[in-house]
Amino acid sequence: MNPSPAPATPPRPTAVPSPAAADEVVRRLRRARRAARGRSEESTATSVYIAVFTALMAGMSFLSWLDSTLAAPEPPAWAGRVAPVLPELIALAVLAVLWLSVRDALVRGPIAVERPMVDWLLVLPVPRRPLLRPLLLRAYAVRGAVGGLSGLAAAAVIGSVALAPAILAGGLAGVGSAAVGAAVVRFPESPRVLAWLTPFALAVAALLFASALGVWDAPVAALAATGPWGVLAAAAAVVTAAAVTAERPIGGIPADVLRSRADMHAALRYGIWLSEPTFGHDMLREGAGRAPSTRLRLRPPSRAGALVLWRDVTGLLRNPVAAVRSTAFAALSAVAVAAGAGADPALQAGAAVAAALLLYAAARPLLVGADYTAAVPQRLLLLPHRPPAAVLLHGGVPLAVLLLAAVPGVAVAFALVGVRGLVLAAMLPAVVAGALGGTFRGRLPAHLWTGYESPMGNTAPIQVLMWHLQGPTAAVLAAAPPLSGMLPGPMVPVWTVAATVLLAVWAAGKGRALTGR
Amino acid sequence: MLGSVDPVLTTDGVVQRYGGRRVLGPIDLRLEAGGGLAVRGPNGAGKSTLVRVVAGREEPDEGEVRVCGRPPRETDLEFRRDVFVLDEAVFYPDLTVREHLELAAIGHGAGRGAAELVGRAVERCRLSGHADMAPGRLSKGLRQLMMLAGILVRPPARLAVLDEPERHLDGDARDLLAVLVEEARERGTAVLLATHSDALADRVCDARTDLS
């Protein structure tokens, strides 16, 4: 009998590399990627061409608009109404930026790591802070620049705000959002932060609205009375402290956190290149561990014809917030209808458009099942219907829920403005059909990037934008005319029925187009 | 056993090109009811392209494909009734494994018997401990088993098109796959199997075509 082999000696651990190793790793990576980029000159040239072309098309339009707005002799008439409530509006904007930064950081965040970096560099026994710091600094610079441009645009639009403070305020908001985002990414308690921040933010927002309406005097007005530079100096101190504080612990961000955020960053990049803003949303909704809890179950029907309805009800049961959002937007829609009644024609039309958009916003969250199916067209073939029929069936449950969700708003609108409140309810089928058509629009066709020259510039960006806004546009075209009260009485039911039928046919056609048949 | 005089699947001179480059064909196939045809070849030989053409997802640039006497169109209800296609897993992230199988069973007319049918399929495909989880939380192997279980919750298909069904499956699961394919053939289902596995091809198919 052979003796058992001697147990293998485990390898002796080597010394941990010095911090300088991290810098050397980054230098080598840059050199290697430069070499690789040199080997693909053609694709680099193409990428540069596309980037410059896109920047010129978007940037020239923006600069042209900015130039004409700044050159206008007088600010627009409505700017005078905004001036008294400007402190509250700015405070609301800062609150919104803070809340959005936290929400973004929970799934993406400001540190734009590439997935290969996570899997190849961050697993090395080198300090991570030198690897991640450049990315955070870049985020500060980019968000600061975007914030500054936004401040410039806002000052140009409002007209009564000085440019320099506006640019600085925007820049500080941008840097601050990156700092907040970095802190949220670093610390695992972050989801709880959003849980208490949301009601707090809503409460503060409500107080600011009340102050803007003159119901209450918020301290912001008193603060603003001291002048912009004092406030900005304090803000700059706070933001600088936050930025420095957020940078220190970034070396401790767990790798799995960076991995998931790297995937989201990639999804956003692809979404921008493909002009598909929903790309990241699909990944967000369907990423590993992000699917809703499946504890709540509904027994499936025995008839195949009811399967789509069961699929949609299941989706809504597992996303209960959708119904809450829907009710809130439906109520706001009724408020818009009531606000426009009896006003001058321009205001009536504006209120009707707002009401139609709010109706669309009420319908949209309920299309949970349709969203899932549209994200991967192959799922249309899991359903026992021809694709056009499957698309229309996806509107059944949302319409039923929306009719219920809209009852409070419609009742209030009816009490305030009479029959026009009922028109709100009558337009719901058309709005749902429009939302369905927008949901099943598929991927952006490449030919839309070929525009033609018009007095407003190249039409390509507008074509792309309109492609993505099919749903809200359909809702506005269908619902705004009857909601504005400008249609003669007998025309309203005819319009309602015709709009519903046309949009239903349009939505069904999307199903056929998505599956290529 | 399904009876059929005409072949279930024929391809006559089928050619497929991508960007001017021919990636498949010309290929002539004939598959009778209950027959089993393995399609072999290295990566890039056109196996998956052939599967997509037969599954009605692409139209061939040249030639003709007929499945059950008709051109394959996966949007046709009759095509989906007659043909079972197994390739990459497609699923709803918010539905459980059991709910996916119930969707398939009821969609194929199982009615009130769906729950029992699905229960047996779940047990047979070793999904009992995972049936109430969302597929997104499962390993690729278990997702593949979920897709495979789809063949048990529907009436026998006239044609089963399987594209590398053995991927991500362990040894026992591959045995199960082979048994399920054999049982399907005994019920009269014609099987078109694109695979890298010689063992699987030899066990479940009696004819072979090589695309290399």
Image (cartoon, coloured by chain):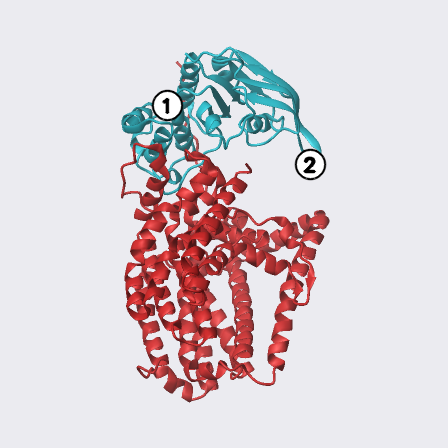
The tint of chain A in the picture is red
Q: Residue B21 at x, y = what percent?
A: 70, 32
First-in-chain label (1 vs 2): 2
Q: Which residue is mark 1?
A: B152
Residue A16 showing in the rendered view: no
Q: Is residue A7 left or right of residue B208?
A: left
Give the CA separation, mark 1 to mark 2: 39 Å
The residue at the point 53 percent across, 84 percent down is: A162
Task: Give neighbour class at mark 2: few <14, some 14-19, many 20+ (Cα, 10 Å).
Answer: few
The residue positioned farthest toward the bottom in the image shown: A226
Q: Quadrant of the N terminus of chain A?
A: top left
Circle 1: residue type: Leu
Please provide percent x and percent y for residue A457.
Answer: 67, 65
Identify the residue at image location x=40%, y=35%: B139
Callout 1: SS: helix
Which chain is the one coloured cyan?
A: B
Which residue in the protein does label 2 denote? B19
The image quarter containing residue A216 is bottom left
Three-letter residue code for mark 2: Gly
Res B152 → quadrant: top left
